[in-house]
């Protein structure tokens, strides 16, 4: 089998957002799509939505943190794996409770990687396969109050880049898709997770009722199209950042830590922090 012949796609986190739309679009293209959702309650709902859309999906319950679910997936004959499942924990790096930090990495890093290990070895045995990691622009940059989420995506970047080197001799392609701030509800939900923290609110450094995601957000169509194309093998670049209008800013911000002094702005609020106070939730990019 060559990579041009790959047809069976597993997309994790397909119940909502980018994964949902990519699953639908790949099915419309004729791929054999296994749309995986985190909980049983999402299974029938996704089947109904697929029927309404007129596409055929195989819907499976797959929680990437569940060893039994991951083991089950090894029997599906996956040829293209889209690691899309993920959560976002909002809050300051000095406030987020330990259990929430651990869960962020279990869902975004450890679970997907362990799932990928088994499937990648099957791909290597066939000498064909494609693995797509849905990372983030925050795998390359950071924003205030999303540092733990960004840390998990920085980890994904390291894993994906290393995996690409390790699997190339085995004929397995590896790519990342890096969405910036898109208006899917995901970013705004990150700024609500503090409401269920099991901590002492009086010890927090920030009052999260005053804060919002610090950037205006784009229409998600660009990510839907790019993620679908990368999974389908229609795009051959390793890193795929959307919106493309943010590529140069992203590269420039990667240089900032090289230039920053430890005394820069001490005693004053950083403008990026102030943006979280000034921004309204779900603010779209104008124009």
Image (cartoon, rainbow, N blue to C red):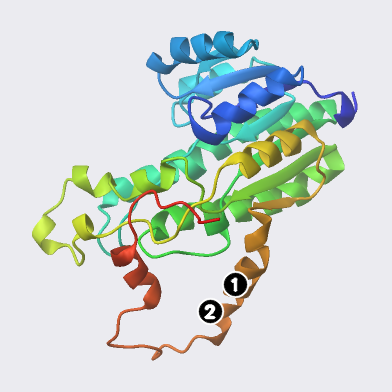
In-image side of 5 versus 144 (left or right)? right
Residue 279 image offset from top left, x and y in percent: 34, 61
Residue 13, which numbered label?
none
The residue positioned 30% from the left and 47% from the top of the image is 100
Separation of residues labelled 1 and 2 (CA atoms): 7 Å
In-image side of 257 versus 28 (left or right)? left
The residue positioned 71% from the left and 53% from the top of the image is 239
Residue 160 image offset from top left, x and y in percent: 66, 49
Quadrant of image for the C terminus: bottom right
Quadrant of image for the N terminus: top right
Total numbered badges shown on the rendered structure: 2
Residue 216 image offset from top left, x and y in percent: 45, 57
Label 2: how many Cα within 10 Å (few below 14, some 14–19, many 20+): few
Q: Quadrant of residue 122?
A: top right
Q: Where does label 1 land, which residue?
A: 254
Q: Quadrant of residue 50?
A: top right
Where is 195 relative to 111, above or below?
below
Residue 14 image offset from top left, x and y in percent: 53, 26
Where is 223 relative to 216, above or below?
above
In-image side of 239 versus 185 (left or right)? right
Q: Are the two marked residues, 1 and 2, in contact with CB atoms closer than 8 angstroms?
A: yes
Decide which of 31, 6 is in the foreground and name it.
Answer: 31
In-image side of 226 versus 180 (left or right)? right
Label 1: how many Cα within 10 Å (few below 14, some 14–19, many 20+): few
Disc 2 secondary structure class? helix
The residue sitting at the front extreme is 287
Q: Where does label 2 land, which residue?
A: 257
Disc 1 secondary structure class? helix
The residue positioned 75% from the left and 19% from the top of the image is 31
């Amino acid at each position: 089998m060559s990579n041009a012949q790959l047809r069976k796609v597993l997309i994790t986190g397909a119940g909502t957002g980018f994964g949902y739309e990519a699953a639908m679009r790949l099915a419309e293209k004729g791929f054999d799509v296994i749309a995986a959702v985190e909980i049983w309650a999402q299974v029938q709902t996704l089947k109904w939505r697929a029927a309404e859309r007129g596409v055929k999906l195989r819907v499976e319950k797959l929680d990437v943190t569940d060893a039994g679910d991951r083991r089950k997936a090894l029997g599906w004959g996956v040829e293209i794996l889209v690691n899309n499942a993920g959560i976002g924990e909002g809050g300051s790096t000095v406030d987020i409770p330990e259990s929430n930090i651990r869960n962020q990495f279990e869902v975004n890093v450890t679970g997907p990687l362990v799932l990928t290990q088994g499937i990648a070895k099957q791909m290597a045995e066939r000498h064909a396969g494609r693995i797509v990691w849905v990372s983030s622009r925050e795998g390359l940059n950071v924003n205030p109050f999303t540092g733990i989420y960004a840390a998990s995506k920085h980890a994904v970047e390291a894993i994906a880049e290393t995996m690409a080197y390790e699997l190339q001799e085995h004929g397995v392609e590896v790519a990342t898709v890096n969405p910036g701030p898109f208006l899917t509800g995901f970013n705004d939900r990150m700024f609500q997770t503090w409401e269920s923290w099991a901590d002492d609110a009086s010890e927090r450094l920030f009052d999260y009722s005053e804060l919002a995601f610090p950037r205006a957000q784009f229409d998600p169509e660009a990510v839907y199209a790019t993620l679908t194309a990368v999974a389908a093998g229609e795009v051959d670049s390793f890193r795929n950042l959307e919106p493309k209008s943010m590529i140069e800013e992203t590269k420039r911000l990667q240089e900032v830590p090289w230039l920053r002094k430890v005394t820069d702005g001490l005693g004053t609020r950083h403008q990026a922090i102030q943006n979280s106070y000034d921004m309204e939730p779900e603010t779209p990019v104008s124009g």
